[in-house]
Amino acid sequence: MIENLYDKSDAGAWRAKAGSNEADQELAERVYTSRLIGQNRDLLMHGGGNTSVKVERANLFGVTERVLHVKGSGWDLDVIEAAGLPGVRLDPLLALRQLDGLSDEDMVNVQRCNLLDSTSPNPSVETLLHAFLPHTYVDHTHATPFLVLANLPNAEEVCREIFGDRLGIVPYIMPGFGLAKKAAEVFDSNPEVEGLLLLNHGHFAFGATAEESYGKIVGHTNEVAKHLEMTPPTSLRERKPADDLSVLPVLRGVIAEQARDVDAPMAVFDLRNGDDAQAIWKRDDVTALSTRGMASPDHVLRTKGRPLVLPESVWRKGREAIVQAVQDFEAEYRAYFDREAPRAKEPKTLLTPDPKHAWIEGIGVVGMGVNAKAAGAAADLAEQNMRVRMVGEDAGGFYPLGETDQFECEYWSLEQAKLGKGTPPRFQGRIVMVTGGAGAIGLATAKAFAAGGANCILVDLDEGRLAEAVAELGDWHQTYACDITKPGAAAAAMNHAVHSFGGLDILVSNAGSATGGALIEIEDDAFRSAFELNFFAHKEFSTAAAKLMRLQGRPGQILFNISKQAINPGKNLGAYGLPKAATMFLMRQLALELGDDGIRVNGLNADRIRSGLLTDDFIRERAKSRNVDENTYMAGNLLKREVEARHVGEAFVALACSERTTGHVLTVDGGNTAAELR
Ligand code: ZN
């Protein structure tokens, strides 16, 4: 049962926040119930579903206009704000209904031309459907129970059984003008209906108030679930611990390998391995269900029409068997394109034929995307679709859109028009692990990579500090708390990278700590523990990362934070400089040994950066002992300017971008003749 979470006082609070304008208040309540819908994963998944409200607003001349606020593209309902529901003048939209036909390009243009705010995102492709229905509030979802119903072979019959004539039934038409017109016709034939079932697509409900429309969405969905005797999923979105995930980095590399360009990024993975994600493997119709198609048309844009299916008997055989499975998948995809493209009105460009989600026996469901966000959306839809297929098949049959309708959505002209436009961010698709990631330099480095589109994993000792750091870094990054000097820590961290994102592209082995003291005085334990952190942890993490990169079989990178101490000793810093010197040699040795794998290994020699290592107290003391003020001390270099953590982060990024550089040390110290490499 989906709970109706509408709360009068919450709704009132949203309205109150919106000020005194009535239209703004309606819009605020629209935001409130849109979020209620978006935050329930059984009601709504990424991209699917949209909401609207019709209001009246005075324009600049004081003339009242009817305005439709409808979800804009790029916004997700769970976190939507008023700006995510752009206002469109309603009357020009209604005038379109008299047309016999309207191209998608013309439809988008009319919608944009009638925006109240010219900078708004594009209104939803289902805008006209919202416009043509007369109700103040209109809600549209692709709820799981409705997707089961919408894809039954006798969906109309079952719908009538459940709802009588309370729901209108709209045949499948691709979203756009044609669907809007047809849905309006169905509505007009019985204006008493509470909502619409869109065959092979989803559900609409509406009402005079936000509460009424939302209540119908929830109520109708529960009625369908009850009729189908659906039990709520118990483990959606679950990612539970797993020891052996080595198939994932292999698969990640194999898929990228088919694209030929050796430097092209690999996909980011999102693993779901709760019981629900494994349920399909208890059935004997896995192959049949995998090839039927997706439960709703827009799913195909994020997931392709079918999953890559990897039974345990296949992936256990190793890389070659996985290569074969991926090549078979891609050959089938190309054949589908070759069958369908000639039927289209205009020439179509083949999309990349690689899978966007996988069912892996014994592992789970994997979503794949150009970054973690896209992979998460694909995984959400993949999980939902797996469930819809199983429930639907047992309730009479899962019969989604045929191949031709699927192709029409996947190769929709407006989607095709986006191809090749814009350059993806430099580190999109790159998974970057930073040790010491909660510290000043580590976090600045992660920020520099994240700004380029990377998904990062911050590794550090303390969970609390990691939580603060990742909050600063933003969404779609991960943390891993461990003592990097403990045996097994590196392997466990690599497993975490695979578990989180499917693999690793760049390791920034950054964590370190200075131990002071003259060599003839320092305790043996302290000296050895300095080596544990400043050398052995680097060695363990870099070799573990290299092993993982070898599984992927694609280029990767290892970057070390060394230190100027490695070549320019400071008094009483021997316990720091000695292991750092060994780390510099480690960098060179690995560059030599990993070149064949396309793994580049480089390092940075930074100096005098404010951080956990060089604290404000320490700086004060140093400056005092040299008889200079703190700023002069910090700027004690050839450039006479302080070197900040962000400069180190940017230098790591510069090394990462230097595609034909390996075995190199870059200094980031503002210039220091004594610390120059020669
Ligand atoms: Zn839809």
Image (spheres, helix red, strand yellow):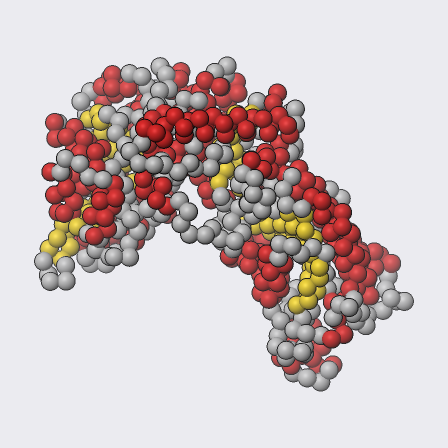
Residue shown at 24%/51% (left/top)?
112
Location of the N terminus by quadrant is top left
Residue 222 visible in rendering: no
Residue positioned most to the left: 63
Query: Residue 377, image x and y in percent?
Result: 44, 39
Query: Residue 605, image x and y in percent?
Result: 70, 64
Residue 244 visible in rendering: yes
- Against 172, residue 106 (above or below) is below
In the depicted view, which residue is nearer to us: 53 or 552? 552
In the depicted view, which residue is nearer to us: 65 or 596? 596
Tell me how many marks there are: 0
Residue shown at 83%/59% (left/top)?
527
Residue positioned most to the bottom: 627
Q: Which quadrant of the structure image shows residue 342?
A: top left
Residue positioned most to the right: 520
Query: Residue 24, image x and y in percent?
Result: 22, 54
Location of the C terminus by quadrant is bottom right
Asked if residue 79 lies left or right of residue 614, the reply is left
Asked if residue 662 lies left or right of residue 568, the reply is left
Asked if residue 352 lies left or right of residue 657, the reply is left
Query: Residue 338, image x and y in percent?
Result: 41, 28
- Against 627, residue 297 (above or below) is above
Residue shown at 71%/59% (left/top)?
664
- Against 241, residue 458 (above or below) is below
